[in-house]
Every structure is written in C-alpha cells, then in structure tokens.
Image: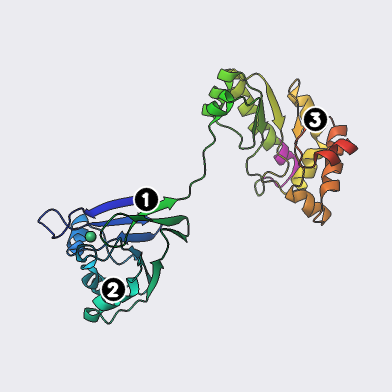
Amino acid sequence: MLDVCLLGTGGMMPLPHRWLTSLMARYNGTSILIDCGEGTQVAMKEKGWSPKPIDIMCFTHYHADHISGLPGMLLTMGNAEKTTPLLMIGPKGLKKVVNALRVVAPELPFELQFMEITEPEQTFSFDGFRIETFRVNHNVICYGYNIVIERKGKFQLDKAMALGADMINDVSGGEEAMWKVLAKHRAPYILTHACEITSQCPTYDATMSQVLDFLQARLDMLRRLGVADVVVDPGFGFSKRGLCNMWLLDTLPQLLEWLGDIPLLVGASRKHFVREITGKNDIVEASVAFAKLAMERGANFFRVHDVAAHKHLI
Ligand SMILES: [Zn+2]
C-alpha cells in the first residue's frame, strides 16, 4: 500500500499550522520525500513520521522554500544512524546545490547519490514502482513527479462477457462471485483442479480423493448457482508432482465415469512435468503423445499451444 502525507502546502515562508511544500510517501519499505523546505522536520515530527527510512529525495526546483530544510534534515538522518545510501533526484544543478548546502552538514554516515533530470520528461525505475518526472511552468526549471506503482490488471468477467466472450477458461479453481456472473450470462465454464497437492498427497488414492473432493464441492456449488454448462479439467501440472500427473492420466476413465455427462478437458501441453519426465527441453512431441494417451482414455477437449502438431497426430 502507498501512504502519502502532505507535510506542507505553503510557499515563501513557513507559518504556524502551515508548513512549506513537502510530501512524503511510503511504499513497500521505501520512503520518498518530495521537496524539503524550512521546517519540514517539524511537520514530519508532528505527523509522527521518521526521516531515517527516507531512501529517495526529489526536488521540484531550487528555490529556498523547497530545499532550505535539507541540511538540518540530513543531519537528523545522520543522528538517527542512517547508513544506507540516499538517492537525490532533481533538475540540473542538483549536485551543486546540495553540496553548497552541505557546507553546514559536512559529516554524514551515509552516501548521497545524485540523478539529475536532463530531459523534459524522464522516468526512474525502482523495485515495484517508478518515478515519472515532467516539466512544469515556473520562472526557473521546475519538475513535477508521479509515483507510479505497477499493479496487475484485474480480469473483469462481466465486461468480458458483455464484449462477447463465449466461454471462461478458469485455471484458478474459481470462486462464488465469478460463478454468479457466469450464471447470469449462461456461459460455459472450464473448472480446473488447482489446489496444492505436491506435499499432502503422497499416494495415488490420496491424490484422487483430493481431486474428487475438490471437484465435487465446486460442481455442487455451480449447480446450485445455475451454471449448467461445465467442463472439468483435472489440472495436469497445476501444483502436482510428476508422478501425480501420471496417476491422473491412468485414472481418466474412472474420472470420466464419475463425471457422468460432464466433459473432460486435458491441458498438458508444454507443462513442466512433461519436461521433468522426459528430461528434454523440446517437449512438443511428448505433449502430443500425452494428449493422445488422454484422448484414448476418453478426454473430450484439449488445451494446447502447438495446434498444428496436435491436429496432425490426434
Ligand atoms: Zn519556486
């Protein structure tokens, strides 16, 4: 989570209850300070935040009301026994300005590193986030900052259905909210066994009973919610040891019998366990052979990468 604290929003001179412009952000163990006017330390103390973990300082420009708090801040960080490097980002002249201010704070137990912004827009990448800089209007060179956190997109089933998706190939094992949307759209659904059986299932029987319990619970729920069109994928290669996958392959006829009218899908194409069993890197042929064996044991559908190779042999 990103915490943001506006330490100050004032200009020119610090006032009681309104400190000079400064923003502090904390993300994933990194603290970032943007601008450090006179009195920023007091504002920080008031908010209960600490200057010690600041790893990155950014400066918009070098007017005193945005940077004159720096020497005192650096000394406080040194007194707090900060030893990790402090990275400074700012417009051209950064090193010169900071070194001038450091005349009154010469001894620091941590290293200062400098990254000067030389382009109208420049991006600095860090672990899990990036800082984007862009020129803004002022009577000296001045930059704005965006802190951008990379986040994985979230699949929106309802939107996908509205855009014309015909079926949902779900390898997560599913959850109720998703199934309710599926029921609304009357869409076909591939239910995949996806729970961890690597360590808990040392035997064939234990593997099978875990797969069947998992499927039974979900099929009951899907039926209750009105998702009628279900295809079952026993999840070859999903958190399963090499041997578990071979047990599953052997037992496909029994699984099909257990499933009754529900079709079975097999997806073993280019899976790690095929590589493990064959000891080869190129496993297209082995994937096809696996699919062929599954087909002989009654599998109805196949999820593959190499369509031409599978089409040829199946
Ligand atoms: Zn200014």
* Gap in angstroms between the C-alphas marked 3 and 2: 76 Å
* Residue 26: quadrant of the picture: bottom left
Q: Which mark is residue 254?
A: 3
The residue indicated by pointer 2 is 97
Farthest front residue?
A: 139
Q: Nearer the viewer, mark 1 or mark 2?
A: 2
Farthest left residue?
A: 16
Q: Quadrant of the C terminus?
A: top right
**Who's the residue at 26% across and 81% down the image?**
106
130 left or right of 193 in image: left
User: The residue under label 3 is which amino acid type?
Assistant: Gln
**Who's the residue at 30% across and 67% down the image?**
52
Residue 186 place in picture, x, y as percent: 61, 18
* Gap in angstroms between the C-alphas marked 3 and 1: 51 Å
What is the basis of the colouring in this image? rainbow
* Gap in angstroms between the C-alphas marked 1 and 2: 30 Å
Q: Is residue 85 visible?
A: no
Q: Nearer the viewer, mark 3 or mark 2?
A: 2
| Residue extent of the magenta highlight | 201-208
The residue indicated by pointer 1 is 2
Please state the quadrant of the image where ligand 1 appears: bottom left
Point out the tag, 3 or 2, that comes first from the N-terminus.
2
* Mark 1 in CB contact with mark 2 (< 8 angstroms): no
Q: Secondary structure at mark 3?
A: helix
Residue 174 place in picture, x, y as percent: 59, 32
Rate crowding at label 3 as few (under 14), some (14 to 19) or many (20 or more) other CA atoms within 10 Å. few
All told, the count of numbered labels is: 3
**Residue 3 in the image: above or below residue 257:** below
User: The residue under label 2 is which amino acid type?
Assistant: Val
Residue 206: say if magenta. Answer: yes
